[in-house]
Amino acid sequence: MPIKSRLTLLTAQRQIATGEKLSLRQLANLTGIPKNFLSRLNRNEVKLVDLEHIARLCEFFQCEVGDILVYEKPTKEKKDG
């Protein structure tokens, strides 16, 4: 899928800034977003996104939508032949 999540990067940046580890379970508790959604988002397995969840993440991390979700152009695979 060409849309990728940067949730791992955001949680790591927060950990560096605060010195405290932030697990997905803690993030779920702090934002009210279901842990299973955060886990699927983190693994880039989300097919549908609730914009309320993204808004809560933006508020929590003090960032923009583009800091959470990024479009990566698909690369063309060369065929042997």
Image (cartoon, rainbow, N blue to C red):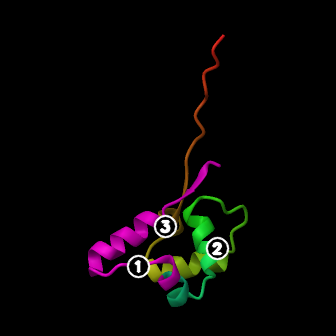
Closer to the camera, 53 or 43? 43
Distance from the alpha carbon under mark 1 to that under mark 3: 11 Å
Residue name at image x 35 percent, y 75 percent: 14
Residue 17 sits in quarter: bottom left
Q: Is residue 5 left or right of residue 13?
A: right
Residue at the spot of label 1: 22
Q: Amino acid at mark 1?
A: Leu
Q: Secondary structure at mark 3?
A: helix
Q: Is residue 63 above or below residue 46?
A: below
Please state which amino acid type lies under the numbered disc 2: Phe
**Between 77 and 51, the one nearer to me in the picture:** 77
As measured in the structure, the alpha-carbon distance from the residue carrying label 1 to the one carrying label 2 is: 16 Å
Percent x, y of residue 37: 64, 73
Number of on-image labels: 3
Q: Residue at x 58, y 78 (%)?
A: 55
Q: Element under label 1?
A: loop
Residue 3 horizontal/vertical position (percent): 60, 54
Residue that lies at the very extreme toward the right in this rendered image: 48
Magenta residue check for 19: yes
Question: In the image, which residues are magenta?
Answer: 1-26
Q: Residue at x 43, y 78 (%)?
A: 61
Q: Can you say which quadrant of the picture contains the C terminus?
A: top right
Residue lying at the far top of the rendered structure: 81
User: To which residue does mark 3 refer?
Assistant: 7
Element assignment for label 2: helix
Residue at the spot of label 2: 37
Residue type of the residue flagged with mark 3:
Leu
